[in-house]
Amino acid sequence: METVRNRNPPRVKYTAPPKPEASTTDLKFTENEKKTITDLKQLYLETINLDVALQRDIYNMEKMYEDKHNIIFDKRKKILDEFRKQNHGDTEFSQSVPNFWLKVLKASYTEFISKKDEKILECLCDIRSRLYNDPVVKFDIEFHFDPNDHFTNKVLTKTYFLNCLPDPEDPLAYDGAEIYKCEGCVINWKPSKDQAKNETHLEEPSFFDFFSPPLLPDDTEDANYCDVNAILQNDFELGFYLKERVIPKAVIFFTGEIADCQSSSGSETESEDTEDELDGEEESSYGNDK
């Protein structure tokens, strides 16, 4: 059973090309009916204002508990670091705890990870999320790396921005918080690896494309608008999925005890079927999960 927060995640903003709308003057209401509808809409607007305040309180509470979660995640990282130091090179790749986060990522959305990416992701030592409430609501997904031969960054970051307020021009259309934008980071590839990365881009998609999201054209009539919009919808969903599912539940992604993968439509179908069987077990065993 999901937590309240997971039952009401931020919506993914979809910016569709404008369509002609039916004029309100076409609706056949009497003057008394129009007045009554106006009064009812004003009451509805009051519920929206309450929802906005509730959403803000939820994020404030989540931020308050973030430090407590990080204490647990620090212990998880310490256990993994100690195992790697003691058993480096002594375990089979298919069950290798030293490659913990690589296997977690492969179990959650495999199509983003090429064989060349795997060698780099063997240096991945932790993934965290970080929530910010002021001045804007946003969250980071942080990928922490050991020193490596591929790039100089210690942390690669992807940031997702949330809108928690109604549109002033159409407040009644408000349907909860939504992710509306994401930003990646610059990867400082080392010269020899930078060339290899460019070759990888020419050959196949890379996991590291995740840190270079496309920009949505301002013009909805742009030929690339719909394609870029679709890519961003998937990107937003993956960001929230990492934050809410993959990071807190990493160990059961690693062991395969959770069938919850966003890699393909087939995997999603399998996930839904298997989740029904695992819901009872997860509720009892992981009911205190974030």
Image (cartoon, grey):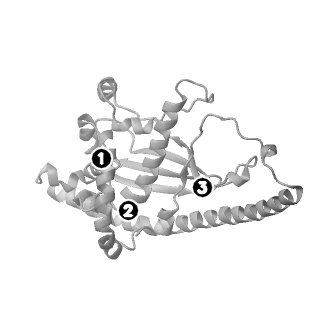
Locate residue 188 relative to residue 149 in the image: left or right: right
Relative to 164, 127 lies left or right: left
- Residue sitting at 78 percent across and 63 percent down? 40
| Residue at image mark 1 | 266
Residue neighbourhood size for the residue with mark 3, other residues' Cα within 10 Å, grouped as few (<14), some (14–19), many (≥20): many
Q: Secondary structure at mark 3?
A: loop
Q: In the image as oriented, which residue stretches furthest toward the bottom?
A: 284
In the rendered image, which quarter is residue 282 located in? bottom left
Residue at position x 28%, y 45% from top? 123
For image coordinates 49% across by 64% down, the residue present is 7
- Neighbor class of circle 2 (other Cα within 10 Å; few <14, some 14-19, many 20+) is some
Under mark 1, the amino acid is: Gly
The residue wearing badge 2 is: 248
Residue 285 in view here:
yes
**Helix, strand or loop at mark 2:** loop
- Mark 2 vs 3, N-terminal side: 3
Q: Nearer the viewer, mark 1 or mark 3?
A: 1
Q: Quadrant of the N terminus?
A: bottom left
Structural distance between the alpha carbons of marks 2 and 3: 22 Å
Which amino acid, by three-letter code, is at mark 2?
A: Pro
Looking at the rendered structure, which numbered label has been put on residue 182?
none
Image quadrant containing the C terminus: bottom left
> Farthest right residue?
31
